[in-house]
């Protein structure tokens, strides 16, 4: 049985992810290239920039949801279908890293967070691919999440930038972390 807290957290993550789902609505334009919509069919998974990923963090009470979206090029160095054994091994290794939250983000120990669930998906479309990693955590002291560090850049050398969206009971805010500045201070953001 799912607990009510986890159900409401999942709903919040779905709301945040709804903007991403909107890309699927463009499927209907695939056959209209001759009308000048040359890029419409390539904006589905192709809308991402190489070197740039996104991470959504939702804090709802003691529950914290974390979702990462990153282009395949950032994670394994290529986006086409894995053909060689080396490429297949690279995807397997990447999925193992993505499933380990400590390779992606460092949450202050004072927050006393425990990972409840984690899920990694690899989506492909045409010549584009994206990796998604989702985590649900329970934090004893979520107010202690005053800063975040991102070992993600060490784990994935091709990644250069992460767009961070943080949603709490105080509202939503957007931040940016890069390979040069892989830490984010959230202290005092009331």
Image (spheres, helix red, strand yellow):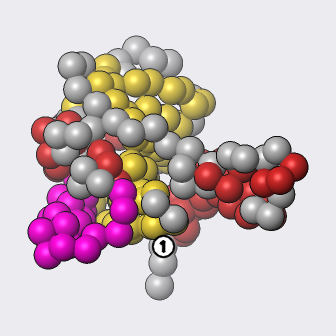
> Is 69 left, or right, of 125 in this rendering?
left
- Answer above or below: position of 126 versus 182: below
Residue 16 locus on image (x, y percent)? 59, 48
Secondary structure beneath label 1: loop
Which quarter of the figure has residue 44?
bottom right
Binning the other alpha carbons within 10 Å of mark 1 as few (below 14), some (14 to 19) or many (20 upward) gives few
Find the magenta span and give its range.
Answer: 79-101
Tally of numbered discs: 1
Q: Is residue 182 visible?
A: no
Q: Is residue 94 magenta?
A: yes
178 is within the stretch colored magenta: no
Foreground pick, 22 / 138: 22
Image height check: is 127 above or below 58? below
Residue 132 appears at what percent x and percent y? 40, 59
Residue drawn at x 36%, y 57% as measured from the top left: 79
Report the residue at 87% width, 49% height from top. Answer: 35
Q: Nearer the viewer, residue 141 or 73?
A: 73
Q: Give the residue displayed 29% in from the left and 25% down from the top.
A: 178
Q: Residue 118's image quarter?
A: bottom left
Asked whether residue 45 appears in the rendered view, the answer is yes
């Amino acid at each position: 049985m799912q607990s009510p807290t986890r159900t409401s957290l999942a709903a919040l993550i779905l709301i945040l992810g709804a903007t991403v789902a909107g890309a699927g609505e463009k499927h209907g334009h695939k056959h209209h290239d001759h009308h000048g919509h040359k890029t419409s069919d390539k904006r589905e998974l192709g809308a991402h920039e190489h070197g740039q990923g996104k991470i959504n963090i939702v804090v709802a009470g003691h529950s914290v949801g974390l979702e990462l979206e990153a282009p395949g090029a950032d994670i394994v160095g290529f986006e086409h279908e894995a053909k060689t054994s080396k490429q297949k091994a690279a995807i397997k290794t990447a999925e193992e890293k993505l499933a380990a939250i400590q390779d992606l983000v460092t949450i202050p120990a004072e927050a006393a967070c425990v990972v409840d669930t984690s899920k990694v998906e690899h989506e492909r479309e045409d010549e584009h691919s994206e990796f998604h990693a989702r985590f649900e955590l329970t934090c004893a002291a979520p107010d202690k999440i005053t800063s975040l560090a991102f070992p993600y850049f060490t784990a994935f050398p091709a990644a250069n930038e992460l767009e961070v969206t943080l949603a709490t009971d105080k509202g939503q805010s957007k931040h940016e972390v890069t390979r040069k500045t892989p830490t984010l201070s959230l202290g005092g953001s009331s």
